[in-house]
Amino acid sequence: MSAETPAAPGQNDEHYLQVFRRNFRSWRGDRPFWAGLYIVFGGFPIAYFPYAHLHLGHLTLAMSTTAGAGSLIIGVLLVVLGISLWFQKHVRTFAGVAAILLALVSIPVANLGGFLIGFLFALLGGAMAVSWVPGEPEEGYAASVSLAKQDTPDGSAAEPIGHEAADGAGDPNDLSGTSPTNGANGRYSAG
């Protein structure tokens, strides 16, 4: 029996709900999850209310309009945009702007945008989607991950390269290879 072996099998195992919660939290943090959820919540009342019949005692209140198909299309499009924000995070700007426009169009078409409930949720979710940007790794984490310590040919240890000096010019996003520090003038060399 080694030191890494638990005393009883399954003693140090995590509960599957804890693992699921941690994985879901990590997945949720990498995308505009709350923006998509608000947009989905905004799409349901916009699509539902024109087809709903409320019963108040013996009185049936129908809120159907002539544009019932239009409100159904707007609601379904908002739900699709919200779900696409969860699984296609690179469409966040398009989906956010489209959700804002659909929310504005739902005011005259779909019973004041689902009695302002769907309108407000879709508008807020669209604004959140447009303003969301992916997070950047922490400063200490990025420096420790990138080439921590490597041996150089003369036997000394090289210093870690941070993300700010990745290309020698201090610009980590310069992918053109034309920085003045490497002597390139912007033309391709043949060998």
Image (spheres, grey):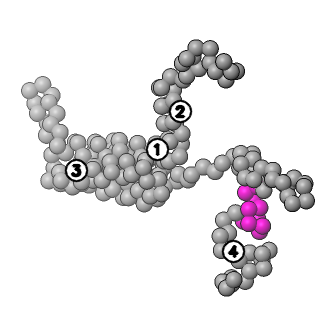
**Residue situated in front as seen by the camera: 123 or 29:** 29
The residue that appears at 57% across and 52% down in the rendered structure is: 134
Is residue 61 on the magenta stretch? no
Could you say whether the residue bearing mark 4 is in a helix, strand or loop? loop
- Tell me the quadrant of the picture where the C terminus can be found: bottom right
Q: Which mark is residue 33?
A: 1
Q: What is the distance, in whole Å, between disc 2 and disc 4 at their CAs?
A: 40 Å
Q: Nearer the viewer, mark 1 or mark 3?
A: 1
Q: What is the distance, in whole Å, between disc 2 and disc 3 at their CAs?
A: 36 Å
Sequence-first disc among 1 and 3:
1
The amino acid sitting under disc 1 is Phe
The amino acid sitting under disc 2 is Arg
Could you say whether the residue bearing mark 2 is in a helix, strand or loop? helix
Residue 121 vs 6, above or below: the answer is: below
Give left or right: position of 88 versus 53.
right
The residue that appears at 74% across and 66% down in the rendered structure is: 167
Image coordinates for residue 153, horizontal then vertical, percent: 87, 60
Q: Which mark is residue 72?
A: 3
Could you say whether the residue bearing mark 3 is in a helix, strand or loop? helix
Span of residues in magenta: 162-171
Q: What is the distance, in whole Å, between disc 4 and disc 1 at their CAs?
A: 36 Å
**Going by the picture, which residue comes out furthest to the front?**
1
Q: Is residue 106 visible?
A: no
Magenta span: chief secondary structure: loop
